[in-house]
Amino acid sequence: MASLGQTTLPPGEKLRTIIVTGASSGIGAHCARALNSEGWRVFATARKPEDIAALEADGIEAFYLDYREPGSIETLVASVLERTGGRLDALFNNGAYAQPGAVEDLPVAALREQFEANVFGWHDLTRRVVPVMRRQGHGRLVHCSSILG
């Protein structure tokens, strides 16, 4: 596997921290585990308890997150900042879901719910971490989506 970046930190430098959403499978799961093995302190999210347990079994700090629930976003950010002393180096917004189907078959309500998660949820999480990154003078935002989600 290719290296995801330098892991040797200068003396006195703290472990780099990242939130990885959508870490139950696919790109999110791979990135959470790879970053963890590269020495990052990873805070991974998933919706299902069994996915959270699997991440924790791999030594990753895992949290429940559903972008459609603003309370879960608020709880995630507060918990991460409490554990890191207010520091966050990166956010990998990866969690999303698809709504496949012919346009005439998709109810507007289903599309609104998808936008709530895939657009407004990402925005809510991002707007909560940007002030932290500005305050500390650094940070990285990465957003990953797909053609369907």
Image (cartoon, grey):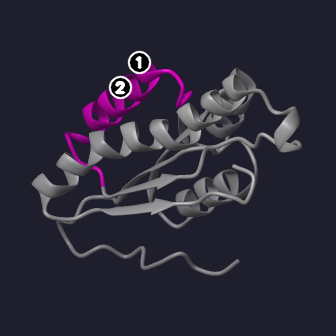
> Which quadrant is home to the N terminus?
bottom right
Q: Which residue is mark 2?
A: 74
Mark 1, secondary structure of its residue: helix
* Residue plotted at (67% across, 36% down): 57
Q: Whole-Å distance between the Cαs marked 2 and 1?
A: 5 Å
Q: Dominant secondary structure of the magenta stretch?
A: helix
Provide residue 130's location: percent of width, then percent of height. 25, 50
* Residue plotted at (36% across, 46% down): 126
Q: Are marks 2 and 1 in contact (CB under 8 Å)?
A: yes
Magenta part of the protein: which range?
65-88
Which mark, by number, is residue 93? none
Q: Type of residue at label 1?
A: Gly
* Residue plotted at (78% across, 40% down): 99
Nearest the eye: 117 or 135 = 117
142 left or right of 134 in image? right
Figure disc tally = 2
54 left or right of 66 in image? right
Q: Which residue is mark 1?
A: 71
Q: Type of residue at label 2?
A: Glu
Mark 2, secondary structure of its residue: helix
